[in-house]
Structure formats: C-alpha cells, structure tokens
Amino acid sequence: MIAAIEPTWYLVLASVLFGIGAFGLLVRRNPLIMFMCIELMLNAANLTFVALAVQLGDINGQTAVFFVLVVAAAEVVVGLGIIVSILRRTPGTTADDLAELKG
Amino acid sequence: MTDATFLEYVVFFAAAVMILGGAIGVVIFKSPVHAALGLVLTLFGVAVQFVALEAHFLAAVQVIVYAGAIVVLFLFVIMLLGVDESIDLSIEPIPIQRPLAAVMGVGLIGLIAAAVVRSRDALVINPGTGLDVAGENAGHDANIQQLAANLYGDHVFAFELTSVLLIVAVVGTVLLTRKWSKADSDASAERVDS
C-alpha cells in the first residue's frame, strides 16, 4: 500500500528545478542560455503556485500563475530585444564582455 | 494499491524525469538550439504536472504560450543572429565559480526541500474557498469557469494592467531593435543641437 501523491512532492520537485535553473544562470555565459535558465526558475515558481492552489483549495494560486505567464512573456520580449541589439553590434559576445552599459 | 494511485505515480515520475532531464539539458548542452529543445521538454513536463493537478486551462496556456511562443522566439533569435555554433564549455574564466555555484545550488535545493518537508503538516492553515474541480457537480470546464470568475472578478484591475504591460513591452522592443537610418540619426542630432 502506497500513499497518494502529496503536494509536498511537487514542491520538492519545484525546488530541484529552481536549483538547477539558478545553477545554470550562474555558470553559463551565453546570454540566451542565461535567459532560458530564468525561464526554468519561473516555471518552478509556477509549479509551486499550482501545487499549493490544490493543497489549500484556493483558485487564487492559479490566477497568480496566469499573471506570471504574462509577465514572463513581456520579460522575454524585452530581454531578447536587448540581446538582439547587443549581439548585432558585437557578435559572439558573452555576459562577461557586458560589464558596462555602454553600447 | 489501487490502479488509479499507481497511474498517478507513473504520471508524476514520468513528468518529473521530463522536467529535470530538460532542465539539466538546458544547463549542459553546448549548442543554444539543443538547450532550447531541452527547455521545451521541461515546459511540456510542467504542463503534464498541471494536468495532474487539475489545472487544465493553465496546462493549455503553458503549451501555447511557453512552448509555442516563447521557445519559438528563442529559436528565432538564435537563427537570426547565427549564434547556433557550439560553445566550448571547458573554458572557465573564473576558476572557483562552478564549484561555488554547485554548492549554492545544492544548498538552495536542500534548504527549500527541508523547509517544505518540515512544514508539510502546517500547510493547511487558512484553507481557501475550494476548487470546483473535485465537486460532484463539476463539469469538464469547471476549472476554466472558476478561474475566469476569479480573474475577471477579484483581479480585473490587474488584468487590465497586463494589457498596458504588454503594449509597453512591444513598443519598447520595436524601438530597441530598430535600425536607425542615417537621415534619422542626423535629424535627431540636429534637434539636440538646436
């Protein structure tokens, strides 16, 4: 006899996903891949929201995920715009080369 | 052990393997295109977990917005800029960075997991109004109806503000990535001078 899956399992899974995303953000130098790692961490937060919405029986958690999705989309659009304009000016640049805001 | 519980386990662990495998792929793949495909795997796994958690609308939105729009945007940028060659990951400009980052990541996971496991009995402190998905008169669209009532009821002002946010993001991106012609920059320079 095994117990049913608890929301705790989802929270632990989300914490592992967040940790991997944070690790990738720290070690990778390609700005695009750093952006993907930020998406991983956002997804971990979304998973936490939905798991706790089920645990607490509260639909507000799912509404929060909806807003996170919207903000993530806006963030990706602006961030990729910045990355495109930087990489068009200096191709093959990494995050180490972007120590100054000057173009 | 009932069959339904066993099936839940299969779904949970299959989706967990998808999520973690894709996430590790994002971090360790050399080519940005492969990393983007790993990201797709993770996003689909999260969508599967959303279905398992009875959040059907969010699962659909996850696939459409994330896998359908955001990852395609990433791939467009990779192709547009031609940065899809492999990166040499053996170069470490700061030697101690990777061990430190690993310690930070493992510590973060350990701390969060410890806090979650420790507080598992204290989670139900202030139960909400209840999700309709488990009710006996819940239809197949109960999740969408409840989410819509909440979104357009309690959070309607925030919902309107998201439209402002999206417009600002789109206009800002168009301005950021626009190639200014010589005449335009000369004209603006004259305006600044005069």
Image (spheres, coloured by chain):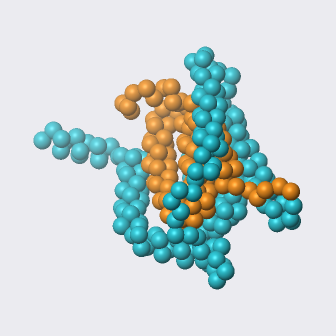
Decide if residue A93 is on the left or right side of residue B168: right
Among the 4 quarters of the image, the one containing residue B171: bottom left
In the rendered image, residue B142, in percent from the top left (x then y), is placed at 60, 77
| Chain identifier, colour orange | A
Q: Residue furthest top?
A: B95
Quarter of the image with the N terminus of chain B is bottom right
Q: Residue furthest left?
A: B194
Decide if residue B161 is on the left or right side of residue B91: left
**In the depicted view, which residue is nearer to us: B44 or B155?**
B155
Among the 4 quarters of the image, the one containing residue B32: top right
In the rendered image, residue A89, in percent from the top left (x then y), is placed at 45, 35
Q: Residue at x 76, y 48 (%)?
A: B17
Quarter of the image with the C terminus of chain B is top left
| Chain identifier, colour cyan | B
Decide if residue B154 is on the left or right side of residue A31: left
**In the depicted view, which residue is nearer to us: A52 or B185?**
A52
Measured along the vertical axis of the image, is residue A38 above or below residue A51?
A: above
Measured along the vertical axis of the image, is residue B134 above or below residue A34?
A: below
Q: Residue at x 64, y 22 (%)?
A: B99
In the rendered image, residue A3, in percent from the top left (x then y), is placed at 79, 56
Query: Is residue B75 visible to the viewer in this orientation of the structure?
Result: no
Query: Is residue B155 visible to the viewer in this orientation of the structure?
Result: yes
**In the depicted view, which residue is nearer to us: B160 or B67?**
B160
**In the depicted view, which residue is nearer to us: B194 or A28?**
A28
Q: How many marks?
A: 0
Q: Residue at x 41, y 67 (%)?
A: B155
Q: Residue at x 40, y 54 (%)?
A: B169
In the rendered image, residue B103, in percent from the top left (x then y), is placed at 63, 26
